[in-house]
Amino acid sequence: MNVQIIYSTHPEDAKELDTNQLRDRFLVQDLMQKDQLNITYTTYDRFVLGSAVPATKDIELETFDELKASYFLYNRELGIVNVGSKGAVKIDGEVIELDNKEALYIGRGVKEVVFLKSEGAAFYLNSTIAHKEYPTKKIGKNEAIVINLGEDQYANKRVLNKLIVNDILDTCQLQMGMTEILEGNVWNTMPAHTHLRRMEAYFYFDLAEGQTISHFMGEPTETRHLFLENNQAVVSPPWSIHSGSGTSNYAFIWGMAGENQDYGDMDILAFNGLK
């Protein structure tokens, strides 16, 4: 297990950061490494993101020192999305198979989570603090809530897949979904917005080799950007916008935590209001 910590940053402090400092504080680079469990613990709502790629061996989701818990889900809930080929997860002895882009919610109190060996499977993880136990549930492709968004004329045509959301199942605070940018389109989450009631993390994947994504962040009138490669993630503070544009189409998984589970809880910003 590889563990890193990202600490919260005040918006006034963020204005003074150079490129390398921005990347250190908000970018997660070492995801989807074969036979590794990579975990990033943030002090934004105690949100955890990570990856497990069990190419040649099983990988168990273990606790770590910063959790001060006897097992990972002692006081947490967990969301998993398989972004690789077909794989399986063992949960307290029960094996659940996940196909590409299928999701799994695991509630507080589950003691054993093992990603079973499978060449090609690649699991992306989000975890939040939980106050109550909710049952494990798989969200297959037919159970996702699918919404078509955007227009070709604005280069932001995309398909939103709500996966682990309160319209489908009960969670304490974790909400997750996946957005797929259609070919010929590049923009995501535009018009941009903020939501002070919750933080968010974006994991970008399905980006063609040699292409890049510019993720826009910061206060609406003090924006910054980070250039990302495939299989990288950005931690988005509650005060920050979170939008992006790629040199080709791509997909991303959004995960949220905070006091509000309402997907529509957004303070929308006008296109020409950003600076």
Image: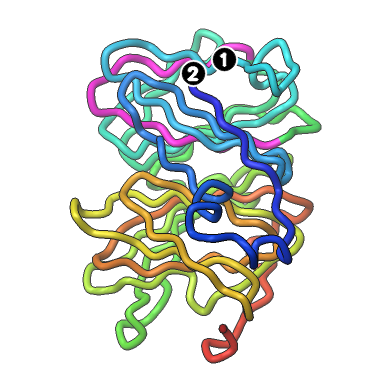
Asked where in the image residue 215 lies, by quadrant, the reply is bottom left
Q: CA distance from mark 2 to mark 1?
A: 8 Å
Q: Disc 1 on helix, strand or loop? A: loop
Viewer-proximal residue among 91 and 3:
3
Name the residue: 55% across, 50% down: 26
Viewer-proximal residue among 150 and 238:
238
Name the residue: 57% across, 84% down: 274
Residue 1 numbered mark, or none: 2
Number of callouts: 2
* Quarter that holds the C terminus: bottom right
Instruction: Rate crowding at label 2 as few (under 14), some (14 to 19) or many (20 or more) other CA atoms within 10 Å.
Output: some
| Colour approach in the figure | rainbow
Instruction: Rate crowding at label 1 as few (under 14), some (14 to 19) or many (20 or more) other CA atoms within 10 Å.
Output: some
- Which amino acid does the dot numbered 2 rest on? Met
- Which amino acid does the dot numbered 1 rest on? Glu
Name the residue: 41% across, 26% down: 52
Q: Position of residue 111 (x, y in %)?
A: 63, 12
The range drawn in magenta is 111-128
Q: Position of residue 183 (x, y in %)?
A: 22, 68
Residue 243 numbered mark, or none: none
Disc 2 to disc 1: CB gap under 8 Å: yes
Q: Which residue is mark 1?
A: 62
Nearer the observer: mark 2 or 1; the answer is 2
Q: Position of residue 159 (x, y in %)?
A: 38, 64
Going from N to C along the chain, the mark reached first, 2 or 1, is: 2
Relative to 73, residue 197 above or below: below
Q: Is residue 110 magenta?
A: no
